[in-house]
């Protein structure tokens, strides 16, 4: 991954969209997954992504969810609150031409909207909140409550919930 003054160069690592680059914001305030970390997560999730339903809370520009689409997810629901980042997420979905398997929702990941928009059961949930959220006790409590709500969507015995906090 190359860091530039214009943003971070992110790419899809494997699958249908392998090596395709994702658009990123200028003055990047996001914390993108580096290639090796992302690859490790997807190695652990092998067998859960293909044909599965994925919920990507705090989706950012779609790094994890688009990787899941590329690796064969049936559907990924992306939740992103920041309007500017959400617009880039939509551009990335359009660039990959995967609107039939990717639903972008402009919403607060801690609201009930994500829970209403995702089909059940969910196979994998990505939860990657901003660091500041974990430092604030009230926000951390809201996040943990939401994780408990989202966990109820998971298919027992097949699902995986990975949290990078």
Image (cartoon, helix red, strand yellow):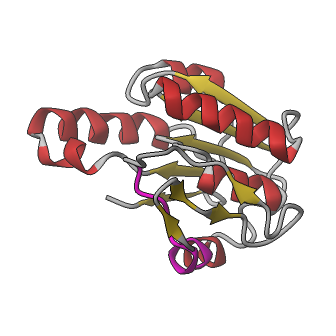
Q: Is residue 115 magenta?
A: no
Q: Position of residue 119 (x, y in %)?
A: 71, 30
131 relative position to 7: left or right: left
Q: Is residue 36 magenta?
A: yes
| Image quadrant occupied by the N terminus | bottom right
| Residue visible at 49% across and 45% down in the picture | 26
Residue 92 versus residue 150: which sits nearer the camera?
A: 92
Q: Which residues are magenta?
A: 30-39
| Image quadrant occupied by the C terminus | bottom left
Q: Is residue 43 visible?
A: yes
Q: In the displayed orientation, state which residue is furthest to the front.
A: 5
Residue 86 versus residue 110: which sits nearer the camera?
A: 86
Q: Position of residue 102 (x, y in %)?
A: 76, 37
- Residue 160, located in which quarter of the rendered image? bottom right
142 relative position to 64: left or right: left
Q: Position of residue 12 (x, y in %)?
A: 72, 64
- Residue 91, located in which quarter of the rendered image? top right
Residue 12 versus residue 103: which sits nearer the camera?
A: 12
**Would you place residue 76 above or below residue 116 in this image?**
below
**Would you place residue 109 above or below residue 36 in this image?**
above
| Residue visible at 79% across and 62% down in the picture | 20
156 relative position to 141: left or right: right
| Residue visible at 64% across and 71% down in the picture | 42
């Amino acid at each position: 991954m190359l860091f530039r003054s214009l943003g971070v160069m992110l790419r899809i690592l494997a699958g249908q969209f392998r090596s395709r680059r994702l658009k990123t914001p200028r003055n990047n305030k996001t914390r993108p997954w580096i290639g090796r970390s992302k690859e490790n997560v997807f190695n652990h999730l092998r067998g859960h992504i293909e044909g599965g339903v994925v919920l990507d809370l705090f989706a950012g520009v779609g790094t994890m969810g688009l990787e899941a689409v590329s690796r064969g997810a049936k559907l990924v629901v992306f939740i992103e609150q920041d309007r500017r980042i959400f617009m880039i997420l939509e551009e990335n979905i359009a660039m990959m031409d995967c609107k039939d398997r990717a639903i972008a929702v402009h919403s607060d990941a801690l609201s009930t909207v994500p829970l209403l928009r995702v089909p059940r059961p969910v196979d994998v949930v990505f939860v990657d909140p901003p660091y500041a959220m974990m430092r604030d006790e009230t926000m951390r409590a809201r996040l943990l409550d939401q994780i408990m709500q989202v966990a109820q969507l998971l298919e027992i015995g097949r699902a995986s919930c990975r949290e990078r906090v």
